[in-house]
């Protein structure tokens, strides 16, 4: 039987904008202006954390750890308040249900994925 693995973020649900918003807000609290272009380059193209910008500014590891926790909290709140499903996803999943095995892959934290 054919198996389809779906990527959750950006394929099934439109989470990238919410994640950017959480990162921008937290980095802004320490004087770093995260632009959408920086976010795309660092997170989406290079697969790195935007917190490299904090390290480049000399922000210590303990502060970066605190900022990550705050980012995760804000992101969870944003997901809980609005997490838009990509247009057409529900119809595609319904049409494939029972005909192919399907699974979801993600690099999201369990809490965020379950939300």
Image (cartoon, rainbow, N blue to C red):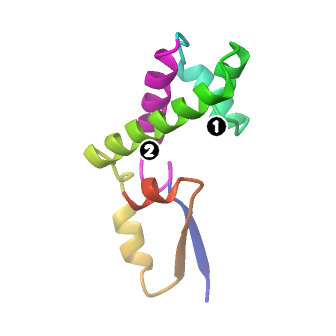
Residue at x 54%, y 73% (from the top left corner) = 103
Q: Foreground: 9 or 114?
A: 114
Whether 15 is among the magenta residues is yes
Residue displayed at 33% across by 40% down: 78
Residue that protrudes farthest toward the top in the picture: 31
Q: Earlier in the sequence, mark 1 or mark 2?
A: 2
Magenta stretch containing residue 114, yes or no?
no
State left or right for residue 52 relative to residue 30.
Answer: right
Q: Residue furthest front?
A: 62
Along the line of sight, the residue nearer the viewer: 61 or 111 = 61
Quarter of the N terminus within the rendering: bottom right
Write down the quadrant of residue 48 in the picture.
top right
- Residue 9 against residue 50 in the figure, above or below: below
Rendered position, 67 above or below 31 = below
Nearest the eye: 6 or 67: 67
Residue 54 got which mark? none
Percent x, y of residue 65: 59, 34
State the quadrant of the C terminus: bottom left
Local SS, label 1: helix
**Position in image of residue 20 (x %, y %):** 48, 31
In the image, residue 104 sits, relative to residue 36, either above or below, namely below
Q: Secondary structure at mark 2?
A: loop
10 Å crowding of disc 1: few (<14), some (14-19), many (20+): few
Circles 1 and 2 in contact, beta carbons < 8 Å: no
- The image position of residue 21, as x and y in percent, is 43, 29
How many residues crowd around disc 2 within 10 Å: few (fewer than 14), some, or many (20 or more)?
Answer: many
Q: Which residue is mark 2?
A: 15
> How far apart in space, not on screen, are marks 1 and 2 (Cα)?
13 Å
Q: Which residue is mark 1?
A: 44
Residue segment shown in magenta: 9-30
């Amino acid at each position: 039987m054919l198996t389809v693995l779906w990527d959750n973020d950006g394929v099934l649900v439109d989470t990238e904008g919410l994640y950017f918003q959480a990162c921008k807000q937290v980095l802004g609290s320490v004087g770093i202006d995260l632009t959408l272009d920086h976010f795309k380059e660092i997170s989406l193209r290079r697969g790195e954390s935007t917190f490299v910008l904090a390290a480049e500014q000399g922000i210590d590891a303990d502060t970066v750890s605190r900022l990550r926790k705050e980012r995760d909290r804000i992101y969870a709140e944003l997901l809980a308040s609005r997490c838009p499903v990509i247009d057409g996803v529900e119809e595609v999943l319904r049409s494939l249900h029972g005909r192919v095995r399907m699974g979801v892959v993600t690099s999201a934290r369990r809490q965020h994925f379950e939300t």
